[in-house]
Image (cartoon, rainbow, N blue to C red):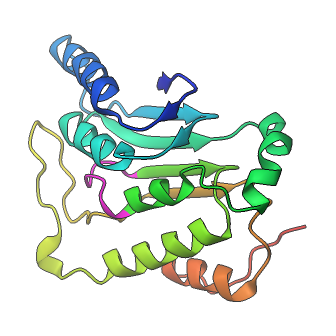
Amino acid sequence: AFNMPQARYFSFRREGQLVQSLCDKLVSEGDPEDAHWTLGFTNSSFAGEFSETLVQAMYRCPIIRCLSFKRNPERRDEDAADIENEVDDGSGILVNLAGSLPPWVTDLTFNNVLNERSLRALVAILETTGKLPAGQETHGSGEGIEAVGQKQGSFRFLGIQNSPHIKQKESLWYSFFDLLGRAKTPNRP
């Protein structure tokens, strides 16, 4: 896993170049094609051109198959007032990634990051990408990475956990689970 430092990211241009050079080095050293690398962000916030520049970096690093965004529980109390007042921490920018990532990024996790508005946006993005014409499917992504039939915005694993700021609104969760093919309300305390 590539764990990025805790920061307020306005761009991923410089960091993306560093990650790309690490990816290139791993590939040149014979990193097997079935290796699945994760790019992880913990306790960070996002703004500006972060989303666009991260997507560009992901297209240059096909060995990265997973993205993870996490906010530690101890940060929950510090951030609770901001989340309740809907101060933008960049979670909206993060969900926009779901429709733009290369098809080989098959795993996406949000741990204690999303709020209700960002979950609504994620549902809308996934609904839209799910309606792309079949011709938009990827049949080969180059550099030895195959994602046959995998569409942009289509994930093998999509995790949303520890999101206490998402109120239990059955219609919102029904919409989300309908996308996954299961119209069942999740069990939540």
- Identify the residue at image location x=28%, y=49%: 104
- Image quadrant where residue 130 sits: bottom left
Above or below, comparing residue 135 to residue 24 in the picture: below
- Identify the residue at image location x=35%, y=80%: 128
Residue 16 percent across, percent down from the top left: 29, 29
Foreground residue among 106 and 60: 60
Q: Say left or right for 51 vs 25.
A: right
Q: Does residue 163 appear anywhere in the picture?
A: no
Above or below, comparing residue 102 to residue 39 in the picture: below
Above or below, comparing residue 171 to residue 119 in the picture: below
Q: Say left or right for 110 vs 131.
A: right
Above or below, comparing residue 125 to residue 112 in the picture: below
Q: Does residue 53 appear anywhere in the picture?
A: yes
Q: Which residues are magenta?
A: 99-106
Asked whether residue 100 is drawn in magenta, I would say yes
Residue 11 percent across, percent down from the top left: 36, 37
- Identify the residue at image location x=50%, y=24%: 3
Residue 99 percent across, percent down from the top left: 34, 64
Residue 7 percent across, percent down from the top left: 55, 28
What secondary structure is the magenta-colored segment mainly?
loop
Asked whether residue 44 is drawn in magenta, I would say no
Foreground residue among 91 and 112: 91
Q: Say left or right for 89 vs 17.
A: right
- Identify the residue at image location x=34%, y=34%: 12
- Image quadrant where residue 21 sits: top left
Image quadrant occupied by the C terminus = bottom right
- Image quadrant where residue 67 sits: top left
